Image (cartoon, grey):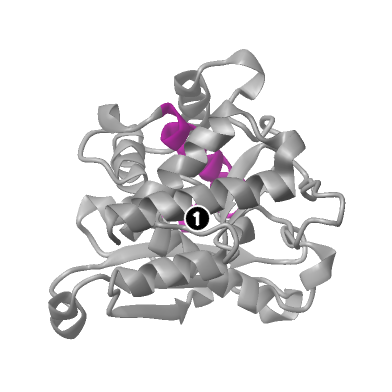
Amino acid sequence: MKKADVVKLLRVNVSEARLRWRPFLNAAALQSLRSCTEQFHFGVAAGDLLLLDHGWYVTHSGLLRLARRARCVGIQVEPVDTFSDAAHSRFAFKATVYKSRSSYKSRSSPGFVGYGDADPSNVSPLVRGAEMRVAETRAVNRALRKAYGIGICSVEEIGSFAGQSGSSGEPKKLPQPTHGNGNGNYGGRTVRDRLCQLIRQHQLDATLVKSYATDFCGVKSLREATREQVENFVTHLAEWAESDRDALLCQLNSYLGQKACC
């Protein structure tokens, strides 16, 4: 996209965001919107982004449009039978995103892998009965966000259905995880403290978590990641560890260069 087109898109995004969420926009939210617009060319009017509880979330359709713009050549999705139980409406999927045609044809590259799970306990009542679809969508979203270095969570990953905002312009609030307030503050503790606590609590390998965090934030070194990206990673890690630690371990083990346990 040409620079002039990006400037125009940013102007439209800011205007649309103020129209929908004016009472909830602050300088930080506008700066984050600018970053998402310039880096990923997301469009608010197109439904790529939603503002929920003062934080931006990318939608499934927004991620698919980004993949198409970036000429993604393939997304492979497969069920993870080990962690699925159809009788209890519990499903898990693995998604692999291939960014180049050569890696897709030859499978010379492992691609970018994401896991997603869903069951009645972690989906909104509005989508009960569609847990299989939710799990598949979450897996694809995580793989796409990993492939393109997107540091904000997707709507479908946070455990509740986010519909369009009402006529008042107020976004629908989502239930927040018990481990924090959803915006990375975690009751005043530093992000590093929260991450260390998660590693200890769930007995994770710190080196593998660091590798995953670098991949998740789309940077070569974790020091290059912004605070917002790291906060989003910590929130993502906590939610996944609590909902399906085994699938998270499979994801972390992929950084050992060995075959995943799944």
Say above or below: 111 vs 237: below
Q: Amino acid at mark 1?
A: Asp
When the figure is inspected, residue 69 is found, relative to residue 203, above or below; the finding is below
Given residues 105 and 92, the one toward you in this image is 105
Residue 153 in view in this figure = no
* Magenta segment: 227-249
Count of numbered labels shown in the rendering: 1
- The verdict on residue 136 being magenta is no
Is residue 152 or residue 62 the one in the foreground?
62
Label 1: few (<14), some (14–19) or many (≥20) C-alpha neighbours in 10 Å: some
Task: Report the quarter where the N terminus lies.
Answer: bottom left
- Magenta: main secondary structure equals helix
In the image: residue 39, left or right of residue 103: right
What residue did someone put label 1 on? 246
- Image point 40% across, 63% down: which residue? 143
Q: Secondary structure at mark 1?
A: helix
User: Which residue is farthest top?
Assistant: 188
Foreground residue, 51 or 107? 51
Measured as percent of width and height from the top left, residue 185 is found at 60, 23
Query: Which quadrant, please, contains the C terminus?
Result: bottom left
Q: Is residue 160 left or right of residue 215?
A: right
Q: Please state the horizontal and vertical placement of residue 199, each as a whole percent of the image.
A: 46, 32
